[in-house]
């Protein structure tokens, strides 16, 4: 049985149809009503060229004692509402979930057609160009959402597909202590989860982490969970596997990589059960509702 994950199965698949001369799916065409707020690369760029308008943020309040807050990022063409509905059903009463919606922007993989996306992407490969400006803006949005949490609350970030890529990028910014543009990264990430995703900016990561003892220390102590299905024909399994290998070889010593035979570009109860167990252990949650 598949979880009723709202639009994840259609996410990015439409790029395949586009390449074959087909049309874009409803998921790719889906746009969201934008909030009144905007973020001009909130990571502190003095000469920001773009202003990114983020959509609505959906919050799932903890059902028990609040111990951790996790920002969860949706995939390409989706929105924060759909994942908030799934996360609300998980047996994690001590976690507050914050599910923002990405800006609607032109995306190269769709020939410039606009849809909700955390950054621009044209090709998922190590050789492909990285949209550092877009990644920094989204990582800054995550940091801003976490920055108002109480001091005793553990902070985390996670996501699916493009959201997973953004979550892993945020984790590397925390370890490095800086955004890609060199400005300081302001929050302390305690755990990061990436489902069916990949690691952006992997080529420059080694120099960033090895260039500072403090960065190496943060990388070594940060728990990371990457999950990927062998049947994923959207973000191929090899990209998830390679991402885990790069992180491990770069000095991230607490990386867990879980493989699911036959799993495509979606999630299943077994995977979400593993996420729940891993988060409970990594964040030291007591599981109580009082």
Image (spheres, helix red, strand yellow):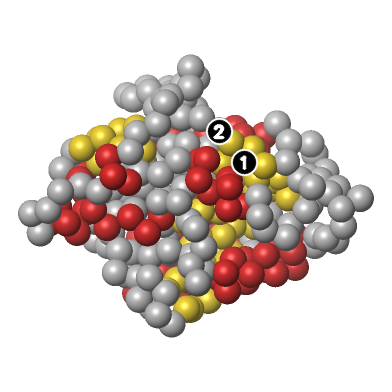
Camera-side residue: 230 or 190? 230
| Residue 281 percent coordinates (x, y) | 75, 68
| Horizontal side, residue 167 vs residue 285: left or right | left
* Residue linked to disc 2: 57
Above or below, 175 relative to 257: above
Name the residue rendered at 36%, 47% in the picture: 76
Residue most toward the bottom?
261
| Residue 217 percent coordinates (x, y) | 65, 61
| Residue 45 percent coordinates (x, y) | 44, 27
Q: How many marks?
A: 2
| Residue 83 percent coordinates (x, y) | 53, 48
Name the residue rendered at 86%, 48% in the picture: 65
Within-10-Å neighbours for mark 2: few <14, some 14–19, many 20+: some
The answer to whether the residue labelled 1 contacts the one labelled 2, judged by CB atoms less than 8 Å apart, is: yes
Residue most toward the front?
1
First along the sequence among labels 1 and 2:
2
Element carrying mark 1:
strand
Name the residue rendered at 29%, 54% in the picture: 12
Above or below, 255 relative to 94: below
Quarter holding residue 150: top right
Real-space Cα distance between discs 1 and 2?
7 Å
* Residue linked to disc 1: 98
Camera-side residue: 153 or 186? 153
């Amino acid at each position: 049985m598949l979880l009723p994950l709202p639009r994840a199965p259609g996410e990015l698949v439409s790029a395949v149809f586009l390449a074959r001369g087909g049309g874009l799916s409803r998921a790719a065409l889906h746009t969201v009503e934008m909030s009144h707020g905007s973020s001009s690369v909130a990571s502190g760029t003095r000469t920001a060229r773009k202003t990114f308008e983020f959509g609505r943020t959906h919050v799932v309040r903890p059902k028990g004692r609040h111990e951790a807050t996790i920002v969860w990022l949706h995939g390409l063409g989706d929105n924060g509402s759909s994942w908030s509905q799934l996360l609300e059903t998980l047996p994690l009463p001590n976690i507050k979930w914050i599910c923002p919606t990405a800006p609607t922007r032109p995306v190269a993989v769709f020939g410039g057609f606009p849809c909700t996306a955390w950054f621009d992407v044209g090709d998922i490969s190590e050789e492909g160009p990285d949209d550092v400006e877009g990644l920094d803006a989204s990582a800054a949005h995550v940091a801003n959402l976490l920055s108002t949490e109480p001091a005793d609350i553990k902070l985390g970030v996670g996501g699916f597909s493009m959201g997973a890529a953004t979550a892993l990028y945020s984790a590397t910014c925390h370890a490095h202590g800086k955004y890609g543009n060199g400005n300081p990264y302001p929050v302390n990430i305690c755990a990061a989860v990436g489902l069916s995703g990949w690691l952006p900016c992997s080529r420059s990561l080694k120099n960033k982490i090895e260039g500072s003892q403090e960065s190496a220390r943060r990388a070594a102590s940060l728990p990371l969970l990457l999950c990927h299905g062998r049947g994923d024909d959207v973000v191929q399994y090899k990209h998830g596997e390679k991402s885990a290998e790069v992180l491990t070889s770069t000095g991230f010593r607490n990386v867990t990589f879980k493989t699911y035979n036959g799993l495509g570009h979606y999630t299943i109860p077994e995977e979400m059960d593993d996420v729940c167990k891993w988060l409970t252990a990594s964040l030291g949650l007591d599981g109580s509702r009082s």
